[in-house]
Image (cartoon, rainbow, N blue to C red):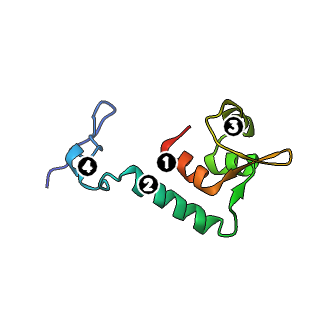
Amino acid sequence: MKTNKLNSRTKINIRPRAEEVVAHLPKALSDDDLFLYNLSKLDRSFPEKLLFSIKETASVLNVSDDFVSNRIRSGKLKATKLGDRSMINKLTLANTITKGV
């Protein structure tokens, strides 16, 4: 058996072929399917929660509190006011995860 000696200039193609990668990708999901999936993930992760604070929403979305607050002020993210606190509904959060802000 012949072995090739590798030197610093030898290029090794470690990328799989595009067809192999595409074959393993899941089928395209509709927005409704993605919404239901995201809602079920939120239900499993936070079974007793219906409303999320700005801090909790920021944590779930992996963004800053200021980002969430700015989106609420600009009207891009719908929030419910409870006294002086803004709370984001679980459905709104699932929709935001699905479609973005």
Q: Distance between the residues labelled 1 and 4?
A: 22 Å
Q: Where is residue 33 in the image (x, y as percent from the top left)?
A: 40, 57
Report the amino acid beneath label 1: Thr
What mark, if any, has residue 47 been given in the picture?
none
Where is residue 36 drawn, in percent x and y? 47, 60
Task: State if disc 1 and disc 2 touch (CB < 8 Å).
Answer: yes
Q: In the displayed structure, would residue 11 be above or below residue 32?
A: above
Chain-order first, disc 2 or disc 1:
2
Q: Earlier in the sequence, mark 1 or mark 4?
A: 4
- Nearer mark to the viewer, of 3 and 2: 3
Q: Decide: marks 3, 2 in contact (CB < 8 A)?
A: no
Residue identified by numbered label 1 = 98
Which corner quadrant of the image does residue 79 belong to? Answer: top right
Label 3 Cα crowd, 10 Å radius (few <14 / some 14-19 / many 20+)? some
Q: Residue at x 63, y 40 (%)?
A: 77
The nearer-to-camera label among 1 and 4 is 1
Camera-side residue of 4 and 75: 75
The amino acid sitting under disc 2 is: Leu
Judge from the rendering whether residue 22 lies leftward or rightward of residue 77; answer left or right.
Answer: left
- Verify CB contact (< 8 Å) between mark 4 and mark 3: no
On residue 22, the disc is: 4
Q: In the rendered structure, which amino acid carries the disc numbered 3?
A: Ile
Instruction: Report the quarter where the N terminus lies.
Output: bottom left
Label 1 Cα neighbours within 10 Å, binned few <14 / some 14-19 / many ≥20: some
Q: Reading the chain from its start, which is encountered first: label 3 or label 2?
A: 2
Which residue carries the number 2 mark? 34
Vertical side of 10 occupied by 90: above or below: below
Q: Which of the two labelled residues, at mark 3 and mark 1, occupies the earlier sequence position? A: 3
Question: How many numbered callouts?
Answer: 4
Find numbered disc 3 in the image and state the secondary structure of the residue it sits on. helix
Residue designated by label 3:
72
